[in-house]
Structures are given as C-alpha cells and as structure tokens.
Image (cartoon, helix red, strand yellow):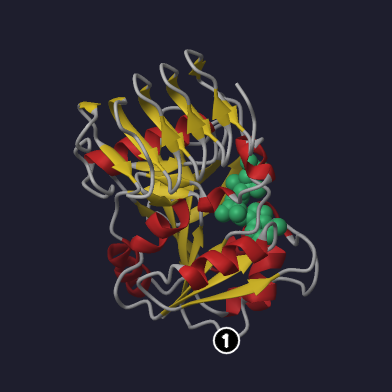
C-alpha cells in the first residue's frame, strides 16, 4: 500500500515563519511536523508519495538528508493545483486502495483500524471523522444511520452544522477515485471532488483520540504538548546546566547553558538560548538566538530570528531573521 501525502499548501495561517519554511518542516517536539505525520502510517504502507508545491525544494532536500522510516518520493507541481489537482498530479502508480493524508494533522489514532473498516465496506472511500466541540471552521459530515456520508457542509454556522463530526484529513480510497479528478485543473478535493463521489459510497471512520489540524500557531503548540505527553517527543528531561521541568527536545548542537525551561519546548540545531532566558510552550528554530534574560512564551521563533536581552515575546510568530 502507498500513502499520498498532501504537502504543497502555502501555510498562510503560520506566516510569517512559512514565508521561508514550509509548515511541515517546522519542528514540533523535536522533529518536523511531516515526520510525526509519517509516524501514523501503519507498517503495511511501503511508500509515501509527497505531493509538493510551495517550497518543494526545501522538502525534497530535507527528506533526502534526513530519510524517514519508510521510502518517500516527492512529486512537484509546477503551479498550485489545490488538494484535488495535486492528488491527480501525484496519483500515477498509486496503490488500490491508497491512504490519503494531509500533512498538518497530528493525531493519536490507529490508521490500521481505518484500513480494516474500509476493507469491510464496499465503498469508494472511507474518511476519518473526528468529533469536535465547534465544527464551524471545518467540513462537517451529515451521516446516514449506517455511517455512510450523505453530504459535507463546509464551514457552516452552528445552526447549519448537521453534526459535530468533521473531516480529519485522513482517508483511504480506491484508486478509481483519482480518475474522477480532471487532469491539470486546480481544484479542492474536499469541496469540489468529494461531493461528486458520495453517491458511490463514502463511509465514515469515527476516530477517537487526540486530533489537531496543526495549521495555526495555537494549535501547533497544542499538538506539541500532546506529542510530548504521548511520549512521541524527543528528549524529555532538561539538559545539564539548565533548570525547569521540561518536557523539552533540544538539539545537541544548540547552546542553552543557564536557561530555564517551563515545559513543552523545542530548540532546533544551532540555536542559542542565553543564561537566565525562560522558555515555555515554545519552538525555537534553526540558528535563532534568545538573548540572556529574554523570555519566550507560547511562541514560534523563526530561523535566525533574535529576541533581545531581557525582552519578552508572548503569543507571537517571528519570521526568519526577525528581531524582537
Ligand atoms: P493555510 O494557508 O494556512 O490554510 O494552510 P495550507 O496551505 O496548508 O492549507 P490547508 O491547511 O487547507 O491544506 C490542507 C493540506 O493540503 C495541507 O497538508 C496542505 O499542505 C495541502 N495543500 C493545500 N493546497 C495544496 C496544493 O495546492 N497542492 C498540494 N500539493 N498540497 C496542498
């Protein structure tokens, strides 16, 4: 079996850091988001095909230099094709069935159960749905009693929402679903293609467990907390010469002597955190500097960005080489 991973979006909700880094390469709990997504794949998956577009070179370079646990192949779109067009573009040679994944989903559930449920139905596809308190930012499913999906309502008001079960961005599809997407045409899989497939039988896999669309700073940091709690983060204890509780994932090439870690922190390679600096719920990216006595709370500090001595950064995203 193969997995088709959509990884070509602009990541606008994580700007300005995504002006220079594709969101899937932002390190969370010690490794890029993409690698946590690939960790979800069951062992029956032999290859992940990455449908890339925005910052495709950076992604191709990173996976070559840091090979994931399974073979990956990158396919590049010359221009953004939307999720539907990207699937068609990258879909040659897909297995039947294939797994389809958004690359910004951090989840704690078992995709082997999704595959088993798909095999038990005679449907064209099975989509993972999760139940959320507020479905209004998502695609919300209306379900038949046998969990067949009758329709999706995109970003409904609370009154319009037919349920609280939303598309989790993880599914399994028969290969023929790809043939139903027009070639070389930009379009959205969720909004423009899936509605045309429902009549062929698309079923819901109701997943329980942690799920987050890690596409905004707040949700990304929540996903990081979950990954540490679930034991899926890197090193957890604070290193020698620092204080605080952790959990933390600090690259060995980073310099952090004398800093205090309040918890759930990633420090990427070659970053420098000065003595007396305080970090909590934070991501400090490659080569960034947190000067002595500065504090960074609930924030993402982009590559080579700098937080001045004694300065406090809270609930912010700093782009590459930014100064605060
Ligand atoms: P925002 O701009 O912040 O909404 O993020 P995004 O660009 O990633 O969009 P969204 O979160 O809706 O995308 C869902 C998934 O589809 C993500 O994994 C994206 O990387 C991917 N994706 C979105 N648009 C494209 C596209 O045009 N081509 C490809 N290959 N993937 C896409």
- Give SS at disc 1: loop
Can residue 311 be spotted in the picture?
Answer: yes
Q: Is residue 32 above or below residue 126?
A: above
Vertical relation: 210 (above or below) 177: above
Question: Up-down: is 322 above or below 213?
Answer: above
Identify the image quadrant of residue 75: bottom right
How far across and down, in percent of the image, does residue 60 sit?
A: 58, 69
As drawn, the residue found furthest toward the bottom would be 93
x%, y% of residue 172?
45, 68
* Label total for image: 1
Q: Who is closer to the viewer here, 131 or 76?
A: 76
In which quadrant of the rendered view does residue 46 lie?
Answer: bottom left
Which residue is painted at 38% across and 55% down in the image? 36
- Ligand 1 has an atom within 8 Å of the beta carbon of the residue at disc 1: no
**Residue to which mark 1 is pinned:** 93
Which residue does the image show at 56% across and 39% down from the upper left?
Answer: 138
Q: Is residue 122 found left or right of 260 in the rendered image? A: right
Quarter of the figure with the N terminus: bottom left
Badge 1 crowding class, 10 Å Cα cut-off, few under 14, some 14 to 19, many 20 or more, is few
The residue shown at (63%, 83%) is 92
Pick whichever, 250 or 58, lies toward us.
250
Residue 55 in the image: state x and y as whole percent: 67, 58
Is residue 193 visible in the rendered image? The answer is no
Point out residue 144 in the picture as x, y percentages from the top left corner: 44, 51
The answer to whether residue 95 is above or below residue 228 is below
Q: Which residue is pictured at 66% across the width and 47% down the height? A: 20
In the picture, the quarter occupied by the C terminus is top right
**26 or 114: nearer the viewer:** 26
């Amino acid at each position: 079996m193969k997995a088709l991973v959509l990884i070509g979006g602009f990541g606008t909700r994580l700007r300005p850091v995504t002006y220079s880094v594709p969101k899937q390469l932002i390190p969370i709990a010690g490794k890029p988001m993409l690698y946590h997504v690939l960790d979800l794949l069951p062992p029956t998956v032999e290859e992940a095909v990455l449908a890339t577009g925005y910052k495709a070179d950076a992604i191709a370079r990173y996976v070559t230099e840091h090979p994931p646990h399974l073979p990956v192949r990158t396919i590049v779109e010359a221009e953004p094709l939307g999720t539907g067009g990207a699937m068609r573009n990258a879909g040659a040679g897909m297995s039947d069935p294939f797994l389809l994944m958004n690359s910004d989903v951090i989840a704690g559930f078992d995709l082997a159960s999704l595959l088993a449920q798909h095999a038990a139905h005679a449907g064209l596809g099975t989509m993972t749905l999760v139940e959320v308190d507020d479905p209004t930012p998502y695609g919300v499913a209306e379900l038949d009693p046998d969990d067949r999906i009758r329709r999706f309502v995109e970003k409904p008001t609370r009154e319009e929402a037919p349920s609280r079960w939303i598309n989790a961005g993880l599914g399994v599809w028969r290969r023929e679903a790809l043939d139903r997407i027009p070639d070389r045409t930009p379009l959205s899989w969720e909004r423009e293609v899936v509605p045309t497939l429902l009549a062929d039988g698309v079923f819901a896999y109701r997943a329980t467990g942690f799920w987050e669309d890690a596409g905004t700073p707040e949700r990304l940091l929540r996903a990081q907390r979950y990954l540490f709690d679930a034991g899926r983060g890197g090193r957890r204890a604070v290193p020698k010469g620092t204080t605080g509780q952790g959990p933390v994932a600090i690259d060995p090439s980073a310099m952090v002597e004398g800093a205090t870690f309040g918890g759930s922190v990633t420090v990427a390679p070659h970053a420098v955190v000065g003595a007396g600096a305080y970090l909590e719920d934070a991501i400090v990216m490659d080569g960034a500097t947190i000067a002595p006595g500065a504090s960074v709370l609930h924030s993402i500090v982009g590559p080579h960005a700098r937080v001045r001595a004694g300065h406090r950064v809270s609930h912010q995203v700093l782009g590459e080489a930014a100064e605060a």
